[in-house]
Image: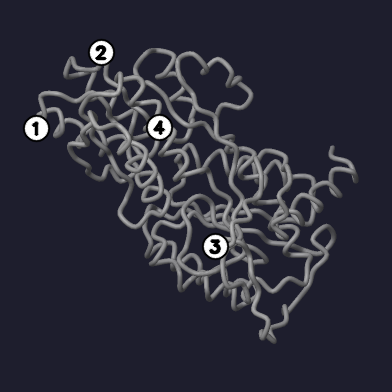
Amino acid sequence: MKTMGKTKKILGVALACTLLVSTALTGCSSVKTDDEVSKKTSSTSQEVKAEVKNPYKDEVKIAFVPNVIGDSVAAAWSTGMKDELAVYDNVTFQTFDGKASAETQTQIMADLVNQKYDAIVLQSADSAALATSVKQAEAAGIPVITLNLDADTPHAGLIAMVDYEAGKLVAKNMAEGMNKTGKVVIIQATAGATRGENLEAGFRDEMANYQDVEILDAQSGEWLTEKANVVMNDFLTKYKQIDGVFCHNDAMAEGASQAAEAAGRLDGMQIWGADGEAKALEYIEQGKMAGTIYTNCFDQGATAARLAMYLIGSETVTSSYTSTPIVKMAPIVVTPETVGSIGENIRW
């Protein structure tokens, strides 16, 4: 059972997130305070929060809407949130399947607003398509916290893996693994996914420093192992030489690895993902992937829950924000040399 000291710690950590003070968080590296992404409130806003609850005594309902139920990242986030909220008998936590559909998520968001949930944690299937839904929830006094996949409107907060920085780390390590020369393909996220766009921007910017590395092609694998397998097979048919493969997540990297292995071309190929899921770590240990960028997703989910609990009990009017505050989780570059540092208790 958690103690009152833990409750105070949760409140303090969430307050630090909300105020964007650069400070250490349990499970995340620091709160970013860049002027372009920091939280700002309108000096002329007359909005007042409709209801302030005691989040530790009053009845509280928190919803989690992932892109799709069953994804390992979303499952780890959900576990982190459940564990963080389990101590509170007054909190109801429920997960709703977005079914990898912006339309489905839009309908779910409307239902949650009508049911007067107190906070929503969202992994947005499409940042533009979900913007109106997020704005409507915020206008109703329901803080929306996004995870990795953002929404194109100011809201309560974004708890994210590093993305642009992760892309740069992958490019640097891949280039070094190829002795700074070779041909590379990219298997992308679904179009419109901000994380995928930022990952690729960082990757391309860093890889531009290596004049003897050529990016041959880029196609969407839609976040999925099976789709990435099909895309990788197309690449293998089209290009006689592929030295590196960058996938926007680990699931797609696994699909690419399977395709390359089946074609007898895996040996020496630098295949990288970006998440750090348990299966990808096993692939690295088995020599089937070159690396990934690991994030502790249990802690990422817990951080979202802490922020939600704080905002529910505060008088902060998140609908008046003019930009979204961002908390970025600490990344770990995982290679065959470092994979052993990720213990079983933090593999998801």
Q: Residues within 10 Å of mark 1 (few under 14, many from 20)?
A: few
Query: Is 282 displayed left or right of 295 in the figure?
Result: left
Tell me, for residue 238, which label it has, or none: 1
Q: Nearer the viewer, mark 4 or mark 2?
A: 4
Contact (CB < 8 A) between labels 1 and 3? no
Q: Is residue 209 above or below residue 134?
A: above
Q: Which residue lies at the image location 70% right of the left edge and 54% below the top edge?
A: 17
Query: Is 308 displayed left or right of 5 in the figure?
Result: left
Q: Nearer the viewer, mark 1 or mark 3?
A: 3
Point out residue 72 in the picture as x, y percentages from the top left corner: 48, 37
Secondary structure category for the residue under label 3: loop
Residue bearing mark 3: 36
Amino acid type at mark 2: Asp
Amino acid type at mark 3: Glu
Q: Which residue lies at the image location 57% right of the left edge and 67% below the top edge?
A: 155
Q: Quadrant of residue 44?
A: bottom right
Q: Residues within 10 Å of mark 2 (few under 14, many from 20)?
A: few
Q: Nearer the viewer, mark 3 or mark 4?
A: 3
Q: Nearest the camera: 34 or 312?
A: 34
C-alpha span from label 3 to label 4: 25 Å
Tell me, for residue 74, which label it has, or none: none
Residue bearing mark 4: 170
C-alpha span from label 1 to label 3: 42 Å
C-alpha span from label 1 to label 4: 24 Å
Q: Nearest the camera: 39 or 312?
A: 39
Residue bearing mark 2: 267
Q: Quadrant of residue 167?
A: top left
Q: Is residue 268 above or below residue 125?
A: above
Point out residue 168 in the picture as x, y percentages from the top left corner: 42, 37
Q: Residues within 10 Å of mark 4 (few under 14, many from 20)?
A: many
Contact (CB < 8 A) between labels 2 and 1? no
